[in-house]
Image (cartoon, rainbow, N blue to C red):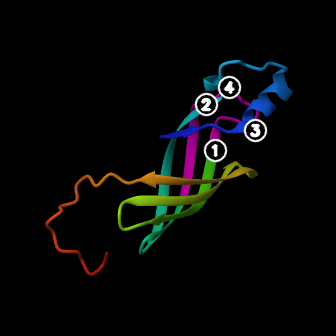
């Protein structure tokens, strides 16, 4: 799942429809995505394909794509830099910080040579 809030969407909606909503939550985009990631140690190269479940700005269509780089730190922090596109049109660069839940990891297990 993805949640987007992009300031450029506010201006794009106003330019397309001459409507400006007072409630900023109307500009939040929500999407579901499928992702493939090629992992090289702590570095990950994701390629993602998504569909907007909620989007008031329909000019770019209902599908979005993302290609980028993720780095996983030792303390479950994820650093992300990616390019979000709509088919062949680049929309914007995005960056972020996330947290990976340690679900399914045994705390007492010895680290593997391959990690």
Residue lying at 61% horizontally and 31% vertically, measured from the top left: 28
Closest to the camera, between mark 4 and mark 2, is 2
Quick one: SS at disc 3? helix
Residue 109 on image: x %, y %: 15, 69
Cα separation between marks 2 and 3: 12 Å
Q: Which of marks 4 and 2 is nearer the N terminus?
A: 2
Q: What element carries label 2?
A: loop
Neighbours of disc 1 within 10 Å: few (<14), some (14-19), many (20+): many
Mark 3, residue position:
8
Range of the magenta residues?
47-63
Question: Which of disc 4 and disc 1 is earlier in sequence?
Answer: 4
Residue placed under numbered mark 4 in the picture: 56
Question: Pointer 2: what residue?
Answer: 28
- Secondary structure of the residue carrying tag 1 is strand
Can the viewer see residue 60 in this picture?
no
Residue 77 is situated, as x and y percent measured from the top left of the image, at 42, 59
Q: In which quarter of the image is residue 74?
A: bottom left
Left or right of residue 98: residue 9: right
Mark toward the start of the polypeptide (2 vs 3): 3
Residue at point 69%, 50% (across, down): 85
């Amino acid at each position: 799942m993805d949640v987007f809030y992009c300031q450029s969407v506010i201006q794009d909606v106003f330019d397309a429809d001459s409507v400006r909503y007072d409630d900023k939550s109307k500009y939040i985009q929500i999407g579901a995505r499928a992702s493939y990631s090629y992992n090289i140690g702590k570095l990950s190269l994701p390629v993602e394909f998504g569909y907007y479940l909620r989007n008031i700005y329909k000019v770019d269509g209902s599908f979005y794509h993302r290609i980028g780089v993720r780095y996983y730190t030792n303390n479950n922090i994820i650093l992300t830099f990616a390019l979000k596109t709509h088919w062949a049109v680049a929309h914007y660069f995005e960056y972020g910080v996330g947290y990976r839940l340690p679900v399914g990891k045994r705390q007492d297990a010895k680290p593997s040579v391959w990690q």
